[in-house]
Image (cartoon, grey):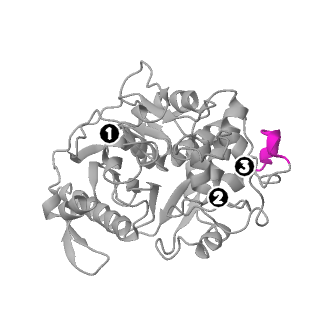
Amino acid sequence: MTLANWQRPPHNQWAFQHLREVIPTQRISRGFGPTAPLAWSENPLAPEVVSVQRLEGHTSTLADVLLETSTNAVVILHDGRIVFEHYANGMASDTPHLLMSVTKSVVGCVTGVLVAHGLLDPEEQASKYVPEIKGSGYDGATVRNLLDMRTGVAFSEEYTNDEADVRAMERHMGWRPAKPSEERIGMYDYLTTLDAAGPHGGPFVYRSADSDMLGWLCERAAGTRMADLVSQLIWQPMGAEFDAEITCDPAGSAIHDGGMSARARDLARFGQMILDDGLANGVQVVPEQWLTHTCTMDPGIRAAFATSEAEPVLTGGWYRGQFWFMPGVLGDLQACLGIHGQMVLVDRATRTVSVKLSSWPVAQHPTFLIDTVRAFVAAGQHAACESLPFR
């Protein structure tokens, strides 16, 4: 395994669980406060009895979906209690795992807390906080444009193209070897080189660079690095059980778009905090008003998503505040998603939080994604029925 191949099978299965041995990381401390309890439900879920209608038309079970989608860890909570937990491929409950773009949702919550503290204004231009981007493609973009990925910046996120902007950014942030003729300038300096492709506030275009710019703004507004912001504003008050970590580039800048590693149970605690409107361990971690606004689909947000490349896969969905949303059987679903199969799914209709950490052989796999969502929705419905007193 090398820096050039750690994201590819079969190496990614090991690397996703040992990233600190591949790339430098910064610790996200859980502090010394109490751990939010995660007790087992009196009605545990048997995955082989949860029926799932698969995207290709046949019916199978939750157990089949997990087996067929390179699952390393899964935790499902119903009403805050564990109904199912499973680890595979060397994972255990205390094993950290790379979250990829699930990290974006954590950074989105950090942003919400900073806004509540008066340190960030969602409608202010990003250049107010980071003047270095004046004259770049980000000049004129607002904090809200970054949150909702509606900047006009030219940035291609083609994971199968080694020449795409997302892969170039990985070289500068230390996730890939630099080319012989290429000077590694660090992620922040790379962001200032991006050009504009159109006006800000237009269509939704998935750009990891927008999340990295958002994280840079958070650090500048708070005067604190992201590892400490996540620790102080999210990880400690929500009652995490373990420290987390985030990769950093050669200059020491955190990779806000996908660099976090954490344990599955702590990710479930994060999802439960989202389900409970920002409340965790008796503490209001993220402002309820911020999360309510994030969950609200207005016509502009929906229209921006409807013309995106994500619409055919997550039909009827939207993207806001660094979270994905999609229509569910009983109500809207909120999701944190990362390539190679990382997911936190919040189903308010059944009060279910489902976490999946994976090592898909490819970055994106629409069938795996939809089958997993359907399996978790079915698990939530099954858990809700099992908890009824008259079943």
Query: Which residue is disc 2 drawn over?
Result: 149
Q: Nearer the viewer, residue 44 or 249?
A: 249
Bounds of the magenta span?
Answer: 123-134
Closer to the chain start, of discs 1 and 3, is 3
Closer to the chain start, of discs 3 and 2, is 3
Q: Position of residue 310 (x, y in %)?
A: 53, 70
Q: Which image quarter: residue 157?
A: bottom right
**Cβ–Cβ under 8 Å for marks 1 and 3:** no
Callout in the foreground (1, 2): 2
Query: Which residue is disc 1 drawn over?
Result: 265
Q: Is residue 127 magenta?
A: yes
Q: Position of residue 39 (x, y in %)?
A: 24, 37
Q: Disc 1 residue type?
A: Arg
Point out the image quarter for the N terminus: top left
Query: Which residue is disc 3 drawn over?
Result: 143
Residue that sits furthest to the bottom in the current view: 57
Q: Is residue 14 left or right of residue 239?
A: left
